[in-house]
């Protein structure tokens, strides 16, 4: 057991600046090479503690393994990938983020690592994704990982009609636009059309 992991999980969200972008870089095996100040603050770990550790040190026990299996399968195939993840802080609290993963390559095109950029998600996204994750985790705990994976594939096909990446991007975008429009109505400050893309979220202004 990693001694840096909390010994007790607390059902409480950590208070953090949700306008911040959390960034980390890993090697091809998921070992942490870099983390920015926002990552350090929200995770409650300092850089000295985390550099050289496996990134799954912040994996929350509420997260089903199939989500990370899907993530790594895509990254290893060279596909940029998005995921909605519940992470664990050093004190045992949690925070939800959407992650935009990109693949880092050397001059010969070989994958040498991954960069993850993360930001908070609207509560409405969590309310929709958390029940799915709980179902997957329950199946995993009772019937095993294979059964969880089978259900996940069938769920995406029969109820969503999309792969996981498209599902995550569309869910996040739709709920973010809805949330922003509600805020605009409240403030009577309509500034123009909202862009349906994740680029604005990680690399530019929302409006």
Image (spheres, rainbow, N blue to C red):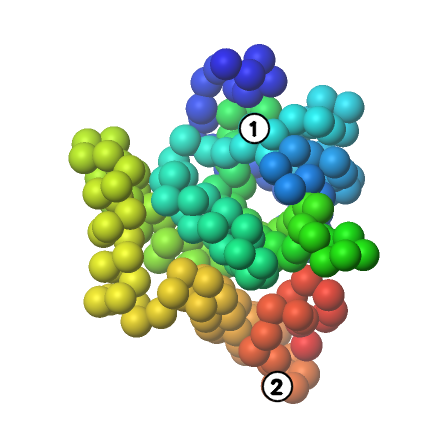
Percent x, y of residue 13: 51, 37
Q: Is 64 left, or right, of 6 in this rendering?
A: left
- Which residue reaches farthest left? 143
- Which residue reaches farthest front? 108
Residue shown at 58% from the left, 58% from the top: 78
**Residue hosting label 1:** 57
Percent x, y of residue 20: 70, 51
In the picture, the quarter occupied by the C terminus is bottom right
Percent x, y of residue 70: 43, 50
Which is in the foreground here, disc 2 or disc 1? 1
Camera-nearest residue between 102 and 73: 73
Is residue 131 among what the camera can see?
no
Where on the picture, by quarter, is residue 36?
top right
- Which residue reaches farthest right? 107
Q: Is 127 left, or right, of 193 in this rendering?
A: left
Separation of disc 2 and disc 1 at Cα? 40 Å
- Label 1: how many Cα within 10 Å (few below 14, some 14–19, many 20+): some
Helix, strand or loop for disc 2: loop
Camera-nearest residue between 37 and 65: 65
Where on the picture, by quarter, is residue 38?
top right
**Nearest to N terminus: mark 2 or mark 1:** 1
In the picture shown, does residue 163 fall above or below 46? below
Camera-nearest residue between 153 and 185: 153
Residue shown at 38% from the left, 39% from the top: 65
Percent x, y of residue 205: 72, 70
Is residue 162 among what the camera can see?
yes
**Residue hosting label 2:** 193
Residue shown at 81% from the left, 56% from the top: 107
Helix, strand or loop for disc 1: helix
């Amino acid at each position: 057991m990693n001694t840096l992991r909390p010994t007790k999980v607390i059902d409480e969200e950590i208070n953090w600046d949700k306008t911040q972008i959390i960034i980390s870089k890993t090697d091809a095996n998921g070992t942490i090479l870099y983390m920015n100040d926002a990552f350090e603050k929200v995770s409650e770990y300092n850089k000295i503690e985390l550099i050289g550790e496996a990134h799954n040190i912040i994996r929350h026990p509420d997260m089903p393994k199939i989500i990370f299996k899907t993530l790594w399968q895509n990254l290893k195939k060279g596909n940029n990938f998005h995921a909605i993840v519940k992470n664990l802080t050093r004190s045992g609290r949690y925070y939800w983020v959407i992650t935009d993963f990109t693949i880092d390559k050397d001059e010969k095109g070989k994958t040498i690592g991954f960069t993850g950029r993360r930001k908070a998600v609207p509560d409405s996204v969590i309310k929709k994704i958390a029940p799915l994750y709980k179902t997957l985790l329950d199946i995993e705990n009772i019937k095993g990982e294979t059964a969880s994976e089978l259900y996940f594939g069938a769920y995406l096909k029969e109820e969503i009609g999309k792969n996981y990446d498209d599902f995550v991007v569309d869910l996040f975008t739709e709920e973010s636009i809805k949330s922003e429009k509600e805020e605009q109505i409240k403030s009577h400050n309509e500034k123009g059309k909202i862009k349906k893309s994740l680029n604005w979220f990680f690399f530019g202004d929302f409006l």
